[in-house]
């Protein structure tokens, strides 16, 4: 008789022998408490609730967008052959357009990326100049009643002028389109900055100014420690409105001046009768404006106290 | 010095839309150095106006105001003001608010380190060392008022002017701050002119109570010396007959002689 050694190889064999019987289980081990499914735990509930809330918040805009696209499709389809391009066609065209946004085939044929950047640059430069002039002017008008009286009639007369009415003056004075379009941005975006800054200065609480008077602060300290921080929220509103106006105006101005930029591109595509591109341009203008606005709102929130 | 702060025949007339409004007339008062004066009177009688005249925030229509033999012309840091609504700058921390004042008064002669030490000492004096780097909106109303006091004291003013500094606080907080103010004034030997409409506060804190008649053309009706020994303890005073006599004198002035008819 040979000794049976148990090793990995014959273990299975032994276990499967008919005479090897599994020891009867004396008692079933107590059932482990079942783990609560994740969605029924506190955290799970919080998660589902947050998801439901997000869904409820997202639902109306999503339905709105869907309806808009549907309406667009209907309008496009009802036009037949010569109707507006539909959403699908426009989408395809947009994909092709954004596949290569930064090509450069000479002065009048540049990628869409370049055109957007050119428009943004003009808005930035024109607005920058407006801020450079408008912010100090607003502070002075707000602080000195005499200046406010002096400037009131001029501002009320010039502010309602349609921005593009300034373009010929710019063209005449500068003889070139680039500075002329900056001039249009400058003159149309300066009013919100001046007016909001001045209103902010006029609304600095008397208490703060009394503190300044009791401390006998220098005009510079009054400006840096009291006026400027106190006016900053108003100033941010002015900047937001001003960039909004600048963005509205630049597209129109570029249609007239030509060369580069989103406005020029819209006009160029109109001449090419590429209606899909015109529609895409409208979306780009809207989307960029939205981003600018939201960015500035976020920035403004950082500067509000309490 | 017997006459540190002097107000002589001060009159204040406001030009309003309805014409001239005489707020104060014939106001005469002299305050000794280190004295604590409480200014009491019905609402609208001209307490703030008088305080603002001393602060220099208003110019008297006629009469003379002198501080240490120099005429008061315009506001200045030697007459620090604790405003009723604290008037802290919300964009500066507690430290920053006090530092602004310290820098203005001592900036020319002291190093930045010394200025910071002064600021810190002032905040410690009012028990706010722990909240130094908080912004005003992060602290309670009582704490804000303490920062206001710290700011004023840090300037080492010749006179500390307070316009109902505890008026907006609840009773418990107010009592705590009154006790603290007593301690601080004792430590710093400050000269104080404090507007209040609280009779207990006036008796507890002051050396003299200046009682004002009702406006228009308000003036000083009576001056009551508060001859209670210091340090004063609000609990011990509760059954001090002299304290109660003083209290009734003020109440009698306010509610019998200057009864304000409901408008
Ligand atoms: N700048 C001002 N112009 C016109 N009237 C004022 C002005 N300041 C205060 N007054 C009037 O002077 C009177 C006293 O005011 P105030 O000193 O604030 O009273 P109190 O501080 O005792 O409540 C009131 O009738 C008030 O209407
Ligand atoms: Mg008052």
Image (cartoon, rainbow, N blue to C red):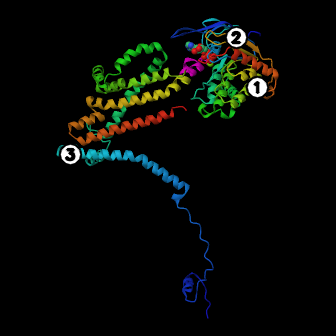
Badges 3 and 2, same chain: no
Quick check: marks 3 and 2 in contact, CB under 8 Å? no
Question: In this picture, is A43 found above or below A283?
Answer: below
Earlier in the chain: of badge 1 and badge 2, it is 1
Which chain is indicated by disc 2?
B
Looking at mark 3, is its residue's CB closer than 8 Å to ligand 1?
A: no
* Of the two numbered discs 3 and 2 in the rendering, the one whose residue sits closer to the viewer: 2
**In terms of image quarters, where does ligand 2 lie?**
top right
Residue B261 position within the rendered picture, expressed as x and y whole percent measured from the top left: 62, 16
Question: In this picture, is A11 found above or below B70?
Answer: below
- Looking at the rendered structure, the secondary structure element under dot 1 is helix
Rounded to the nearest whole Å, what is the CA distance between mark 1 and mark 2? 30 Å
Image label count: 3
Which chain is indicated by disc 3?
A
For label 2, the crowd category at 10 Å Cα-Cα, with few meaning under 14, some 14 to 19 and many 20 or more, is some
Residue B198 position within the rendered picture, expressed as x and y whole percent measured from the top left: 69, 22
Q: Which residue is mark 3?
A: A78
Which dot marks residue B183? 1
Residue closer to the observer: B105 or A282: A282
Q: Is residue A211 part of the magenta span, yes or no? A: yes
Looking at mark 1, is its residue's CB closer than 8 Å to ligand 2?
A: no
Badges 3 and 1, same chain: no
Q: Which residue is mark 2?
A: B221
Residue A286 position within the rendered picture, expressed as x and y whole percent measured from the top left: 34, 38
- In the displayed structure, does residue A301 sit left or right of residue B184? left
Q: Is residue B103 part of the magenta span, yes or no? A: no
Q: Quadrant of residue B9?
A: top right
Image: magenta residue range: A206-223
* Of the two numbered discs 1 and 2 in the rendering, the one whose residue sits closer to the viewer: 2
């Amino acid at each position: 008789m040979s000794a049976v050694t148990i090793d990995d190889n014959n273990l299975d064999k032994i276990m499967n022998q008919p005479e090897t019987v599994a020891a009867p289980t004396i008692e079933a081990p107590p059932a482990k408490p079942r783990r609560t499914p994740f969605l029924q735990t506190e955290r799970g509930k919080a998660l589902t609730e947050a998801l439901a809330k997000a869904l409820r918040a997202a639902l109306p805009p999503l339905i709105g967008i869907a309806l808009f696209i549907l309406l667009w499709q209907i309008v496009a389809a009802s036009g037949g052959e010569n109707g507006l391009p539909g959403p699908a066609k426009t989408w395809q065209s947009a994909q092709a357009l954004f596949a290569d946004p930064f090509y450069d085939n000479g002065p009048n044929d540049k990628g869409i990326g370049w055109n957007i950047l050119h428009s943004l640059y003009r808005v930035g430069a024109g607005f920058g100049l407006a801020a450079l002039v408008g912010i100090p002017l607003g502070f002075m008008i707000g602080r000195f009643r005499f200046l406010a009286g002096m400037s009131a009639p001029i501002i009320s007369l010039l502010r309602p002028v349609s921005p593009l009415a300034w373009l010929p003056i710019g063209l005449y004075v500068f003889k070139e389109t680039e500075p002329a379009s900056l001039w249009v941005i400058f003159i149309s975006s300066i009013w919100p900055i001046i007016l909001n800054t001045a209103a902010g200065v006029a609304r600095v609480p008397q208490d703060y100014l009394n503190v300044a008077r009791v401390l006998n602060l220098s005009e510079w300290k009054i400006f840096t420690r009291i006026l400027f921080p106190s006016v900053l929220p108003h100033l941010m509103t002015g900047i937001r409105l001003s960039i909004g106006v600048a963005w509205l105006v630049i597209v129109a101005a570029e249609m007239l001046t030509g060369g580069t930029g989103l406005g020029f591109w819209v006009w160029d595509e109109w001449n090419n009768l590429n209606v899909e591109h015109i529609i895409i341009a409208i979306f780009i203008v809207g989307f960029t404006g939205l981003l600018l606005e939201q960015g500035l709102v976020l920035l403004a929130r950082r500067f509000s106290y309490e | 010095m017997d006459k540190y702060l002097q107000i002589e025949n001060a009159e204040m007339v406001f030009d309003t839309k309805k014409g001239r409004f005489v707020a104060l007339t014939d106001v005469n008062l002299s305050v000794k150095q280190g004295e604590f004066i409480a200014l009491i009177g019905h609402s609208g009688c001209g307490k703030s106006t008088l305080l603002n005249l001393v602060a220099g925030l208003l110019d008297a229509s006629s009469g003379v105001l002198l501080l240490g033999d120099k005429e008061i012309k315009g506001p200045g840091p030697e007459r620090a003001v604790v405003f009723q609504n604290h008037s802290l700058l919300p964009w500066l921390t507690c430290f920053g608010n006090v530092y602004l004042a310290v820098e203005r008064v001592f900036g020319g002669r002291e190093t930045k380190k010394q200025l910071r030490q002064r600021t810190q000492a002032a905040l410690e004096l009012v028990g706010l060392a722990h909240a130094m780097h908080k912004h005003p909106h992060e602290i309670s109303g009582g704490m804000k008022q303490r920062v206001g006091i710290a700011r004023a004291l840090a300037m080492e003013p010749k006179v500390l002017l307070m316009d109902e500094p505890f008026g907006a606080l609840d009773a418990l907080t107010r009592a705590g701050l009154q006790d603290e103010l007593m301690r601080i004034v004792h430590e710093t030997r400050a000269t104080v002119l404090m507007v209040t409409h609280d009779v207990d506060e006036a008796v507890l804190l002051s050396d003299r109570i200046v009682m004002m008649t009702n406006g228009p053309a308000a003036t000083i009706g009576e001056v009551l010396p508060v001859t209670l020994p210091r340090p004063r303890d609000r609990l011990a005073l509760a059954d001090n007959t002299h304290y109660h006599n003083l209290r009734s004198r003020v109440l009698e002035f306010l509610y019998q002689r200057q009864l304000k008819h409901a408008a």
